[in-house]
Image (cartoon, rainbow, N blue to C red):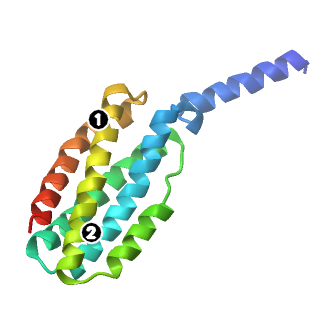
Amino acid sequence: MTRLALVLMATSGLGLMTAHGSAAQLSRQDQTVIDHAATSNVAEINAGQMAANKAASAPVKQLGETMVADHTKANDQLAQIAQQEGISLPTQPTAQQRAEAQKLMALNGTQFDQAFAQNEVQDHEKAIAEFRTEAKSGHDPALKSFAEQTIPVLQKHLRMAQGASRG
């Protein structure tokens, strides 16, 4: 076999890999969004479980339970997109998210409720902004659609967190 034939075979094979969704196909923005969404989903599920068990007020408990359900669903949807793209999702929260969880774990009663709600307001404001950017200017159609569908859920969480933070 000639060198040209080998190069053509190798090149066509790489083309097939890319057409079927390798990580190289995602733009940097899309890759950042999918990574942030995955780590945030895991962190929000963990925080929601903590709130459901530890919160002193009913609104914070309800927020925690809602976040567990909604972020579990979102993570399942994200996993499907990642599988289609041929990429792996992060399965652990970031170091910063783990540190925030440790701070919350040390609190009790109304101090926990207030800190949890305030963290959720900040986290969801950031997430909404990032998802709006992805929905508007992302490159991957499935990820753009995911962002568009997830924004209303994040807005619901933000409203719940704002209400819980007011007491």
The three-letter code of the residue at mark 1 reads: Arg
Q: Where is residue 163? Give x, y as percent.
A: 9, 60
Q: From the viewer's perspective, is residue 14 above or below residue 91?
A: above
Residue 137 occupies quadrant:
top left
Q: Quadrant of the N terminus?
A: top right
Q: Which mark is residue 132?
A: 1
Q: Farthest residue in the top direction?
A: 4
Q: Which mark is residue 43?
A: none
The residue tagged with tag 2: helix, strand or loop?
Answer: helix
Q: Residues at badges 1 and 2 in contact (C-beta under 8 Å)?
A: no
Q: Nearer the viewer, residue 3 or 143?
A: 143
Using residue 81 as the reference point, say whether residue 120 is left or right of it: left
Residue 100 visible in the snapshot:
yes
Query: Crowding near pointer 1: few (<14 within 10 Å), some, many (20+)?
Result: some
Q: Where is residue 95? Give x, y as percent.
A: 50, 64
Q: Residue at x 47, y 42 (%)?
A: 32
The residue tagged with tag 1: helix, strand or loop?
Answer: helix
The three-letter code of the residue at mark 2 reads: Gly
Query: Crowding near pointer 2: few (<14 within 10 Å), some, many (20+)?
Result: many
Residue at label 2?
48
Q: Residue at x 27, y 43 (%)?
A: 128
Gap between marks 1 and 2, in whole Å?
Answer: 23 Å
Q: Residue at x 43, y 44 (%)?
A: 34
Q: Nearer the viewer, residue 57 or 148?
A: 57
Q: Quadrant of the C terminus?
A: bottom left
